[in-house]
Amino acid sequence: MQVDKIDTFSGHRDCVYALEGSNDSSQFFSAGGDGLIVKWNLKTPDLGELIAQVPASVYAICLDKQRNQLWVGQNFDGIHLIDVVSKQEIKSLKITSASIFDIKIHENIALIGLSDGIIVVMDVETFSVKRHLKASDKSVRSIAINELTKEFAVGYSDFSVKIFDLQDFSLKLVIDEHTNSIFSVCYSPDKKYLLTTGRDAHLKVWDVTEKYQLKQSIVAHLFAINHITYHPSGDLFATCSMDKSIKIWDAKTFKLLKVIDKARHAGHGTSVNKLFWSTYEQQLVSASDDKKISVWSLTN
């Protein structure tokens, strides 16, 4: 596998924590510690466009693709709803004074994970809170939705992964196999596997079809693993870590295929926080504490 660094986007003034796709495959959004929400174009990578600015750090953004509206989680404040085209704030709602670690949208439901252990369930259409789910006193770090099984997985800082019913929001299963905080949960594109990672630097693979039986446990990085994302084809997935590296894995065998780091590929010099795998020429985008966003091309 050949890895080429295509470009580096600089413009953020603090760590970059969040990446999100756009309805235009060549564009994506970023956010971070500076409160800036920026739209980038992979065709013209040197030109970032400021979409919005909030007065506190942002860990989570999520695009409502149907309405082309960006949900922005402002830490200690709440949710801002931004119209992507007009760059105007449509609505905002102070749902919390905690940090917002993740936002996921499914049909007319938004799931928002907070640092006080609460998942806020919001109605997308009315932009109102429907209910609160409290299954831990520790942070909700990551949420993944499985449309096929009508459930969602939540990674917590209490070292657990919890599976909830997507329709009645009941707690179905608790997985206690990690030895430290969970930072990322991700279903495979075919929804047969759940991948979980976190501060213990282990990548764990769960077989959804076998009631979440543990399929593999891999010591995947040197330090905490911050995020997992799949290639658009579903054949590969990538992990990124506080050890400053990005690793590419075979999605069928879970074998390591490539390491992207500073020494070999002029990678990031600090923690890699988030990944986004674009359908535009299958380019991989990474965001880091070094305030930069890098774009990678992978070819066989």
Image: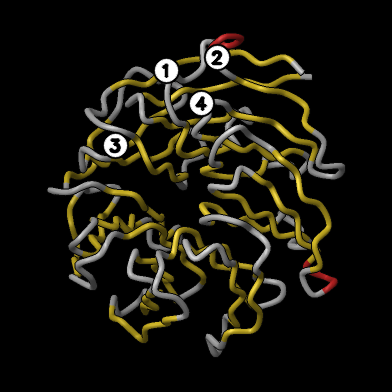
Q: Which mark is residue 244?
A: 4
| Mark earlier in primary sequence (3, 1) | 1
| Mark earlier in primary sequence (2, 4) | 2
3D distance between C-alphas at marks 3 and 1: 14 Å
Q: Observer-nearest residue: 26 or 8?
A: 8
* Residue 26, x across and y down, in percent: 49, 33
Q: Disc 3 marks which amino acid?
A: Val
Determine crowd level at label 2: few under 14, some 14-19, many 20+ residues with C-alpha closer than 10 A: some
Q: Observer-nearest residue: 129 or 63?
A: 129
Q: In this view, does 25 lie above or below 12?
A: below
Q: Mark 2 points at which residue?
A: 5
| Mark earlier in primary sequence (2, 3) | 2
Q: Is residue 105 above or below residue 280?
A: below
Q: Observer-nearest residue: 90 or 267?
A: 267
**Residue under the image location 42 percent in, 38 percent down:** 28
3D distance between C-alphas at marks 2 and 3: 21 Å
3D distance between C-alphas at marks 1 and 4: 16 Å
